Image (cartoon, grey):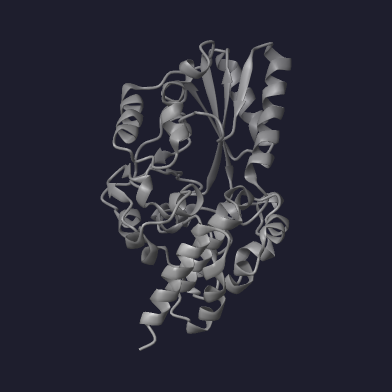
Amino acid sequence: MSNAKEIIRQKAYELGFDAAGFVAARATDAEKNGLAAFIADDRHGDMTWMADTQVRRSDPVALWPEAKSVIALAANYGPATDPLTSTKMAERASISVYARHRDYHDVVKKRTKRLARWMVEEWGNEVKVFVDTAPVMEKPLAARAGIGWQGKHTNLVSREFGSWLFLAEIFTTLEIPPDDPATDLCGECNRCMEACPTDAIVAPYEMDARRCISYLTIEHKTDIPEELMAGMGNRVFGCDDCLAVCPWNKFATPTSENAFEERAELSLPRLADLAALDDGAFREVFAGTPIKRTGRDRILRNVLIAMGNSAKKSFLPIIEKKLDDESPLVRNAARWAAARLTKQRG
């Protein structure tokens, strides 16, 4: 099926993907051992689904025994402006680049399914499509497929697109010759490690999710540890710091995909406006975005922490109104924020 490889790759480009690579549907021992160690050390935190699906996640054939090859796909979502600009605006909320527009799962999955259906029509093979929500080790597969390498922050880095790639996979019963894996080009650079506000990158190529702001603001369901709150700054959904400082971004280009363009209300929302949202208004504002699934209470928890970090005493009346909120998550964050700003009065 060597001739099929370039035909499929070209079709992927025609459908809007920016990179496509091929890899055998087998995990390496290093990948299996890395996942096992991550879970054994409890670095997955509240993400219990990682432990629950460890066996299936550890190897593509454990997820689907008939799989012979994996087509790794990537779509560029590069921002047009510096993502870190928002982290310096104390009265505004910083939202991760990937969540400032329409939910990428919808866009990428439709594209991936179209490619998979076309493959079935052409070769009569069986396929399974995955976009982030299944137990698949996407980044290691993409690295072995030559799309990029996993940097010291554990995220994928591309020579052509820097840090800004959405990933998807097609598992297939076709046996397709693999591409060469990407070369790790991090060298002596440690910028991502130095940039992390909460020291979540505990060693090169090792991440403790329990300290990661993306995990804390999105996945963590209870109160955020007080020793990590100050490091969150005004980040209310995700964090791009380790991605944004990577030197390879100098080769990146802004996305040309209209669906990945920022929505105005998600670019630099006012903390005060977010704090005013009840559950209904929250659902309306964030409909069709990844933020909606996190829910009003967790987002408001993050907003109040951002207010506490702002050094803006004008936020105190807003914070104090949340001390009686129905959600204990919100009330606890409000108490912390009020105490932090009150201490700064002197």
Front one among 275 and 118? 275
Q: Is residue 77 above or below residue 301?
A: above
Note whether residue 84 is visible: no
In percent of width and height, residue 88 lies at: 46, 73
Rendered image quadrant of residue 111: top right
Question: 187 or 283: which is nearer to us?
Answer: 283
Instruction: Give x and y (percent) for residue 200.
Output: 33, 51
Would residue 220 be visible to someone looking at this image? yes
Q: Give the image location of residue 158, x and y in percent.
A: 46, 44
Seen from the viewer's position, the closer of residues 63 and 152 is 63
| Marker count (numbered) | 0
Q: Is residue 25 left or right of residue 121?
A: left
* Residue appearing at x 34%, y 41% in the figure: 43
- Where is the N terminus found, in terms of image quarters? top right
Quadrant in which residue 15 is drawn: top right
* Nearest to the observer: residue 11 or residue 26: 26
Q: Quadrant of residue 264?
A: bottom right
| Vertical comparison of 301 with 22: above or below | below
Which residue corresponds to the image point at 34% horizontal and 39% vertical from the top-left? 184
Name the image quarter holding the C terminus.
bottom left
Q: Is residue 71 left or right of residue 309?
A: right
Report the side of 280 relative to 305 (left or right): right
Q: Residue at x 63, y 44 (%)?
A: 104
Rendered location of residue 61, percent (x, y): 47, 15
Residue placed farthest to the bottom in the image?
A: 346
Which residue: 74% across, 16% down? 121
